[in-house]
Image (cartoon, grey):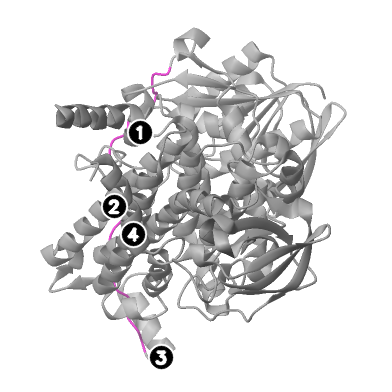
Amino acid sequence: LSCKVLSSVVTPCYCFVSPQIRVKPDNTGVVTDGVKHSMNPFCEIAVEEAVKLKEKKLIKEVVAVSCGPQQSQETIRTALAMGADRGIHVDVSGKDYENLGPLQVSKILAALAKQEDAQLILLGKQAIDDDCNQTGQMTAALLDWPQGTFASEVSLEGDKINLVREIDGGLEHIKINTPAVITADLRLNTPRYATLPNIMKAKKKKIVTVKPADLGVDVTSRLEVLKVEEPPQRQAGMKVETVEDLVVKLKEAGRV
Amino acid sequence: MAALFKARRALSSFFTGCRSLSQLAELPETHQILRQTCRDYADRELSPIAARLDKEHVYPAKQIQELGAMGVMAMEVPEELGGAGMDYLAYSLAMEEISRGCASTGVVVSVNNSLYIGPILKFGTEEQKKQWIQPFTTGEKVGCFALSEPGNGSDAGAASTTAHQEGDEWVVNGTKAWITNSWDASAAIVFATTDKTLKHKGISAFLVPMPHPGLSLGKKEDKLGIRASSTANIILEDCRIPLGYMLGPRGSGFKIAMQTLDSGRIGIAAQALGIAQASLECAADYAHRRTAFGAPIGKLQAIQFKLADMAVAIEGARLLTWKAALLRDSKKAFTKEAAMAKLAASEAATFCSHQAIQVLGGMGYVTDMPAERHYRDARITEIYEGTSEIQRLVIAGQLLKEYQL
């Protein structure tokens, strides 16, 4: 497959270090000020897979994409340090960024895939901040491409892709045509640490900034967040002496 | 008039001495990514095993190789020789993050970079660089620096290890003490006197492979801290090496050692910063969780003042370290700043680790929490690569020159 791979580095996700996640006082979302943002772990795995395919000379070029404000460029730079060839930063900031969801990102990715004539889109299966698990699937649908989601093994065979998917029942082996969308699951690979020389080389690689409007994409959200609240505080449990006591207590609580 | 001129010169050297003063305020993007990469590595691969490495005195061979693959074991070495081709600011950042995960791993990295590869890079011939640097960039092999002896540490000029020429060989005799990495090294830079009458101007530097006939190792020291790194005597008894194994001109050994230690101090300052930072994070985290008198202890001023003092000590030492690194990268004189950085950072490390135990109370005294290990690891930073007392002498020496006293 001599093709270009669009490796989507999903919007940098919120990576909470030591402070705890706090809901904003007006219940419209979580506090993001001063919280460290870094590359979504599943996207790291996707980038690693793309770079590995390039090292095996099965694909020609890896393009890392991120949608978000200026800081997203740092995430793209990390992908470049891992081995991606160039980056595209889709500039979305402020309120647009807060409301950016899978549908908008998929539209952007679909537009970019057409523009770049990409044959493969590799993304993480889901972002660990919103856990939507929708972008890959929506992108495939918008492009009318086959999709291989929750991939734990990917191998290229001519112009087809053999995939092993992790599903509830076990492992599913499928074969899909290209062009295609693949979403990476945890066991697909172990992402490399960028080597220092590659971090230096990444400085010279190009990152192009575009706006969603340039791609003909409207990022207005179709969803309105009504309320965000913390889960109820965990109550203390209680110990009982016998199974009979347990049944009585469960009945009292209306659970049985 | 002379005083004004002196003052103006001092002022202008402050501004031109640090070409990228803005880099102290915000690091360049590459350096930020580098710092984050090293931090991720330390968090995932070093912190989880640091306690076990310390308890069992185990050399982190696998981690050193992984760091080698990343380029961290030869950061300043040009890419053609297998290094990362980065600057000393990058090196300080990497050292701090790695030491924050495991101080022992940090010292192995520092000795290889600054004390072993450093002088060969600066004083070695092209042939020596290929032979003695290239294999030591991947983490598979590490080197060590043998200057101290049982009879002299700070008094480096009084070396009693001798080297005399016999035909086409040097024959080295003597004992070196406190050598970090000794049990895990594949080469050593040994300082020996080739002419006792010239005193410190008679000392020369030699490259010695390990193992080698005539070179043996003393017992591994059982240390208070940095226990995963080996420290031992190196005993040389009629150790014969080819003439080509001398590093730099004859009689330049003392100069090589002093210049090497100047740079090494930046690495050790960064190691101390890592230990101090780890202590602060341990204390801050505990202060957030531990409740007493009805609230997290972080709400109490007594604890807050400690955390503030720790943060100030660290940030001050960190900026000194970065400045020393930036000066070195700009090829400006940096001896005074490196000594200040090492002094400030090592004293910050002992202060912060001491206070961290205090914040943790009883929990700080037991091995369940890393505070006690930081306390033990920090102590050596005030001693090796120039004791705090020597640093003060170096700084005063520079000040006396500046003020023409």
Q: Chain of mark 2?
A: B
Furthest-bottom residue in this view: A241
Is disc 4 on the same chain as disc 1?
Answer: yes
Whether residue A14 is visible, yes or no, is: yes
Answer left or right for B338 relative to A234. right
Q: Nearer the viewer, residue B356 or A174?
A: B356
Left or right relative to B256: residue B21: left
Q: CA distance from mark 3 to mark 2?
A: 77 Å
User: From the viewer's perspective, is B157 left or right of A17?
Assistant: right
The magenta stretch is: A219-240
What's the amino acid at mark 4? Glu
Q: Which residue is mark 1?
A: B26
Q: Of helix, strand and loop, which one carries label 4? A: helix
Q: Which tag, 1 or 4, sits closer to the chain's start?
A: 1
Q: Nearer the viewer, residue A209 or A124?
A: A209
Query: Which corner quadrant of the image does residue A227 belong to?
Result: top left
* Callouts 3 and 1 in the same chain: no
Q: Amino acid at mark 3?
A: Thr
Res. B301 image quadrant: bottom left
The residue at 77%/48% (across/down) is B131
Q: Is residue B232 above or below residue B348?
A: below
Question: Given this view, does label 4 or label 2 mark the residue nearer the observer?
Answer: 2
Q: Element type at marker 3?
A: loop
Query: Looking at the image, which residue is at 41% across and 29% down?
Result: A71
- Residue hosting label 4: B281
Specify the quadrant that holds the N terminus of chain B.
top left
List the residue tagged with mark 3. A242
Residue under circle 2?
Answer: B396
Q: Nearer the viewer, mark 3 or mark 4?
A: 4
Of circles 3 and 2, which is in front? 2
